[in-house]
Amino acid sequence: MSSVQLKKLKQQMDNCRQCLEAGYSIAPKAIYSGVYSARTMIIGQAPGVTEVEAGRPFNAGSGTRLFDWLKAAGFNEKKFRSEQYMTSVTKCFPGKSKNGGGDRVPSRKEQGLCRSYLDREIQIIDPRLIIPVGRLAINLFYPSKLSLAEIIGLRKEINNRFIVPFPHPSGASRWHQIAENREKIAQAIEQIAGLRAELGL
């Protein structure tokens, strides 16, 4: 695959209005970052307000915590953002939830409308390591019936790609704040660090 193909895909994502045309109240501006030569890909749930403002995935608090985990696995944030690839299940900010408690979770239909873009990103970039972050992204690779406690720290291989999930690093999430769950995150960090050495990431 080539950088030309990725550039064309990015233009398609930037110009996409499928969700708006389907009646969903979103803020169109596809958020992603990275290069076609990336060997590691992070897939989040959907961009938030600060991501739209900054024009990059995992900005502010969530990004700080995520990169703390990645730093423990041997990654440098600045280098990672310039050399690897970051995207999400849905590309645009879905807006706030009706009850005002955080961002709205994209519907299954919205996820389906965006799915072809994500599939193409994976196909073009062909990463060796995928790190799904948060439940929506994790469910792309693991059965939804499994709890996070059963999934986090569990390495998986699909089509010669390794999958190592992280929970959502949002400050609103309590899961990663529980002691036994932090042990699971430490296992995931060890898995990623091991793959970095094994694959030369």
Image (cartoon, grey):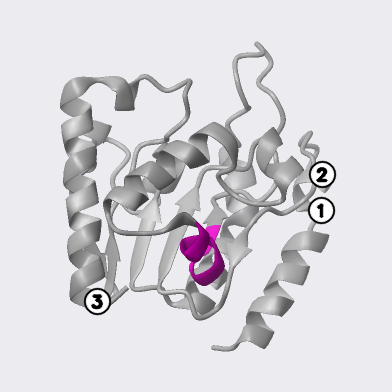
Which disc number belongs to residue 20?
A: 2
Where is residue 141 drawn, in percent x and y? 33, 54
Quarter of the picture containing the C terminus is bottom left
Which of these two is toward me, 99 or 81?
A: 81
Give the residue type that dot 3 points to: Leu
What residue sits 63% from the left and 55% below the top?
114
Pick whichever, 3 or 194, lies toward us. Answer: 194
* Residue corresponding to mark 3: 199
Whether residues under marks 2 and 1 lie with C-beta atoms below 8 angstroms apart, the answer is yes
Residue 182 higher or lower than 114, as above or below = above
Residue 94 quadrant: top right
Q: Which residues are magenta?
A: 78-86
Residue type at numbered disc 2: Leu
The residue shown at (40%, 74%) is 39
Label located before the other in sequence (3 or 1): 1
Mark 3 Cα within 10 Å, few/some/many (few <14, many 20+)? few
Residue 93 horizontal/vertical position (percent)? 70, 40
**Foreground residue among 7 and 22:** 7
Please report the residue visible at 48 percent of the width from the left and 65 percent of the height from the top.
79
Residue beneath disc 1: 17
Labels 2, 3: front one: 3
Taking the image as shown, residue 139 lies to the left or right of residue 157, namely: right
Label 3–label 1 contact, CB within 8 A: no
The kind of residue on which mark 1 rests is Arg
> For the residue labelled by badge 3, is the local secondary structure a helix, a strand or a loop?
helix
Residue 104, given in percent of the width and then of the height, sits at: 63, 27
